């Protein structure tokens, strides 16, 4: 599964998240490019990424920074030490 995430670093939140089947890679790339161009025209600095994972649960585990705030990340890190 392919995940398209538009992330606002300054607020620490996901603005938009879309999912695509693996067979829709070109569609996902086109969507990412369209978002990047629109943000650029509006002078908005957001991170736009395509990520692959088996499912959303796996994505949340491997890319936690998009889904958890700093407090949650710090707490998880402290718990693992």
Image (spheres, rainbow, N blue to C red):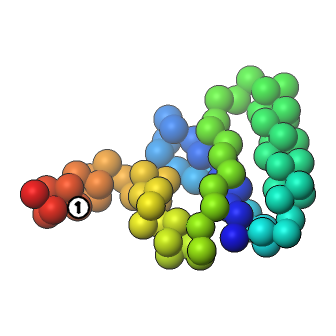
Identify whether 12 is placed above or below 64. Answer: above
Across and down, in percent, residue 52 comes to 63, 61
Q: Residue at left 37%, top 53%?
A: 69
Q: Between residues 72 and 3, which one lies in front from this camera angle?
A: 3
Q: Residue at left 47%, top 66%?
A: 60
Q: Quadrant of the C terminus?
A: bottom left
Q: Between residues 52 and 19, which one lies in front from this camera angle?
A: 52
Residue on which disc 1 sits = 76
Q: Relative to residue 38, is residue 66 drawn left or right?
A: left
In this orientation, does residue 63 appear? yes
Q: Residue at left 51%, top 38%?
A: 9
Across and down, in percent, residue 63 comes to 47, 56
Label 1 residue SS: helix
Density class for disc 1 (Cα within 10 Å; few <14, some 14-19, many ≥20) is: few
* Total numbered circles: 1
Q: Residue at left 57%, top 41%?
A: 8
Kindly indicate the quadrant of the structure image that contains residue 39: top right
Identify whether 41 is placed above or below 54. Answer: above
Across and down, in percent, residue 38 comes to 84, 35
Query: Seen from this angle, which residue lies furthest left?
Result: 81
Kindly indicate the quadrant of the structure image that contains residue 35: top right
In this orientation, does residue 75 appear? no
Q: Quadrant of the N terminus?
A: bottom right
Identify whether 44 is placed above or below 50. Answer: above
Kindly indicate the quadrant of the structure image that contains residue 73: bottom left
């Amino acid at each position: 599964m392919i995940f398209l995430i538009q992330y606002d670093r300054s607020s620490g939140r996901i603005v938009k998240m879309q999912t695509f089947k693996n067979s829709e890679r070109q569609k996902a790339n086109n969507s990412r490019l369209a978002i990047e161009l629109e943000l650029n025209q509006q002078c908005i600095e957001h991170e736009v990424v395509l990520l692959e994972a088996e499912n959303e649960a796996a994505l949340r585990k491997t890319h936690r920074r998009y889904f958890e705030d700093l407090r949650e990340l710090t707490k998880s890190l402290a718990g693992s030490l």
